Amino acid sequence: MSTAEEVAGGEDTPWGEVTPDAARRLLVAAVEAFAERGYHATTTRDIAGRAGMSPAALYIHYKTKEELLHRISRIGHVKALEILRAAADGPGTAAERLADAVRSFVRWHAGRRTTARVVQYELDSLGDDHREEIFELRRESDAAVRRIINEGVAAGEFDVPDVSGTTLAVLSLCIDVARWFNTEGRRTPDEVGALYADLVLRMVGAGAPGVQK
């Protein structure tokens, strides 16, 4: 699925905050190029060509290729944090909120897998300051999930001896969907989200003997 198809088939319009239109077209082209060829193998000429623009036009909107990657990564990580915080702050039991967090996070990584691959797997290509900014957003995402699990343990809903390790496992499981998901496979993003939510609830022992329902 191309980024354009993700836009067409999504429940919201990604990159809507990127203006003007030329800057957005360049960003979409960069996502596709980075996902297909990798950041280091992609040139600014490749990106501009995909956007139907001249290489010189790219520098009107982005000073460097790394600035483009940072913009993509920041927008993607902010969206991921919004998804997880909405679930963490939502109504319901810890089990319900954890399931909602996983369903939504997995659905995003499957439905936006081209974007998600760039957002999640090109972090080492960022400059030091930009990478630290993104790592802080990742720490906040980790904290949102960890809070739900801690609250579930405190309420007797979950049996989790290692909350930090389990949080890392849950997030890693969700993120990896972007690597393997295929629209031609037998499951939709919603179905994968539901499957993973069930798996994660089993992981934390929700509903297990001795654990409150």
Image (cartoon, rainbow, N blue to C red):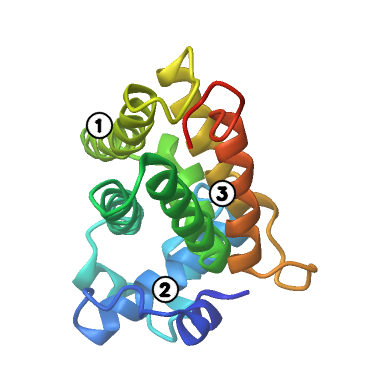
Q: Secondary structure at mark 1?
A: helix
Position of residue 56 relative to residue 146, above or below, is below
Amino acid type, residue under disc 1 in the picture: Glu
Mark 3, Cα crowd under 10 Å, few <14 / some 14-19 / many 20+, is: many
Q: Quadrant of residue 193?
A: bottom right
Identify whether 165 is placed above or below 43: above
Is 126 or 13 nearer to us in this picture?
13
Task: Tell me where residue 37 appears, x and y as whole percent.
Answer: 61, 57
Estimate the spatial distance between the alpha carbons at disc 3 and disc 1, rounded to whole Å: 30 Å
Q: Quadrant of the N terminus?
A: bottom right
Q: Which residue is mark 3?
A: 197
* Kind of residue sitting beneath label 2: Val
Q: Nearer the viewer, residue 163 or 153?
A: 153
Residue 58 in the image: above or below residue 39: below
Mark 3 vs mark 1, foreground winner is 3
Locate residue 109, reporting x and y percent.
52, 57
On the image, the x and y values in percent for residue 133 come to 22, 38
Circles 1 and 2 in contact, beta carbons < 8 Å: no
Q: Is there CB contact under 8 Å for labels 2 and 3?
A: no
Q: Which residue, given by chain and number where applicable, does mark 1 sit on? A: 132
Q: Residue at x 41, y 73 (%)?
A: 28
Residue 143 horizontal/vertical position (percent): 28, 32
Give the CA distance from mark 1 to mark 2: 24 Å
Q: Classify residue 56 by image quadrant.
A: bottom left
Q: Is residue 20 left or right of residue 24?
A: left
Q: Earlier in the sequence, mark 3 or mark 1?
A: 1
**Occupied quadrant, residue 150:** top left
Where 35 falls versus 123 (above or below)?
below
Residue marked by disc 2? 28
Q: Which mark is residue 164?
A: none
